[in-house]
Image (cartoon, helix red, strand yellow):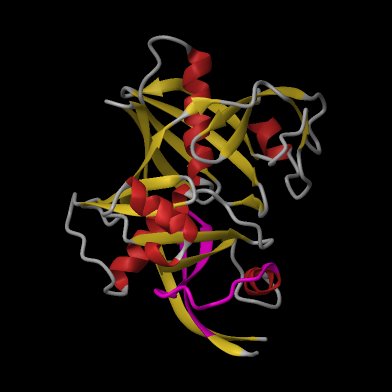
């Protein structure tokens, strides 16, 4: 059955999304429909789709409400290929901006809101500069140190597995020329290959690494289910965590991460349940539209 999808196009440092409101969870999302919407030639074009749905309308949302009854809205995020994703650091900032813009929530400066995701409840606050900061919760080293091969990378490199609600493998490169020379239109090969796949980040530390008490790195990413994107919020977080891990004791807890689409900030903070990692950056809504779908 054909229907019209009323959507908003948004992005966070170039990581772009098609967002739409479906409070009662009535819209049927299929991989074919999602891929059609995200197609950059025949659809709207995006790295993924985000549906705003009330948490009590989805099984995953019910789990979020059990964790925190305040998480009344669920970020139902799907990659461009139609596969579901646990979390999206840029996406959750843009999603919060969308909820506010649509009048679905009210959020004052420095006020936190709880959002349900497949990775659990995450909190987001509005910043005074128009951006948003997301508390992505605790993190862990996970996935070992797989060998990573990528097109135009002459020698395979060891990566570091990090989980920030979704899986990542971070690879350190020698300099900007190595980073710029990668062809991430091709899927990097991990040995061993994680069963559920992983986002793969390639990172180069700045020179000097630390300036003004903050670490500085540059990264590119191949996102699981989407390919190379201009930015990946959880990837920026994983990259900062990996470089801090490699740098050892004395490395800063605040980082500036340059991605192809701009700059985001990462900071680590001790909490009662462990160290949390937070991601700050812009969240832009670009245009509204209607797309007829079969």
Q: Which residue is drawn at 81% across and 39% down?
A: 151
Residue 227 falls left or right of residue 284: right
The front one of 244 and 33 is 33
Q: Can residue 283 be seen in this view?
A: no
Q: Looking at the picture, how far across and down is residue 226, in whole percent?
A: 66, 55
Q: Can residue 143 be seen in this view?
A: yes
In the picture shown, does residue 266 fall above or below 119? above
Quadrant location, the N terminus: bottom right
Q: Looking at the picture, how far across and down is residue 63, in whole percent?
A: 42, 51
Quadrant location, the C terminus: bottom right
Residue 236 falls left or right of residue 106: right
Looking at the image, how many numbered discs can be counted on the residues? 0
Q: Looking at the picture, how far across and down is residue 192, in whole percent?
A: 77, 28
In the picture shown, does residue 49 fall above or below 172? below
| Magenta region, residue range | 5-31
Within the magenta stretch, is there residue 28?
A: yes
In the picture shown, does residue 7 fall above or below 51? below
Residue 115 falls left or right of residue 158: left
Within the magenta stretch, is there residue 235?
A: no
């Amino acid at each position: 059955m054909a229907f019209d999808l009323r959507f908003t196009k948004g992005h966070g440092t170039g990581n772009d999304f098609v967002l739409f409101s479906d409070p009662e969870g009535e819209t049927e999302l299929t991989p074919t429909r999602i891929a059609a919407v995200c197609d950059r030639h025949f659809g709207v074009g995006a790295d993924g789709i985000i549906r705003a749905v009330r948490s009590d309308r989805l099984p995953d949302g019910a789990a979020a409400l059990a964790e925190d009854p305040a998480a009344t809205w669920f970020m139902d995020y799907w990659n461009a290929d139609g596969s579901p994703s646990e979390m999206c650091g840029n996406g959750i900032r843009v999603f919060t901006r969308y909820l506010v813009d649509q009048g679905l929530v009210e959020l004052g400066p420095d006020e936190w809101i709880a959002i349900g995701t497949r990775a659990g409840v995450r909190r987001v606050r509005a910043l005074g500069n128009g951006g948003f900061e997301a508390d992505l919760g605790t993190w862990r080293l996970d996935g070992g140190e797989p060998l990573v091969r990528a097109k135009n990378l002459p020698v395979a490199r060891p990566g570091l597995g990090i989980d920030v609600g979704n899986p990542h493998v971070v690879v350190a490169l020698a300099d900007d020329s190595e980073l710029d020379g990668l062809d991430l239109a091709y899927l990097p090969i991990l040995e061993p290959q994680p069963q559920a796949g992983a986002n793969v980040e390639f990172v180069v530390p700045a020179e000097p690494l630390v300036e003004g008490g903050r670490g500085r790195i540059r990264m590119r990413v191949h996102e699981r289910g989407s390919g190379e994107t201009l930015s990946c919020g959880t990837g920026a977080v994983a990259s900062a965590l990996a470089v801090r891990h490699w740098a050892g004791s004395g490395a800063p807890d605040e980082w500036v991460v340059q991605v192809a689409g701009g700059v985001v900030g990462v900071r680590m903070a001790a909490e009662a349940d462990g160290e949390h990692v937070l991601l700050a950056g812009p969240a832009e809504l670009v245009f509204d539209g209607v797309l007829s779908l079969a």
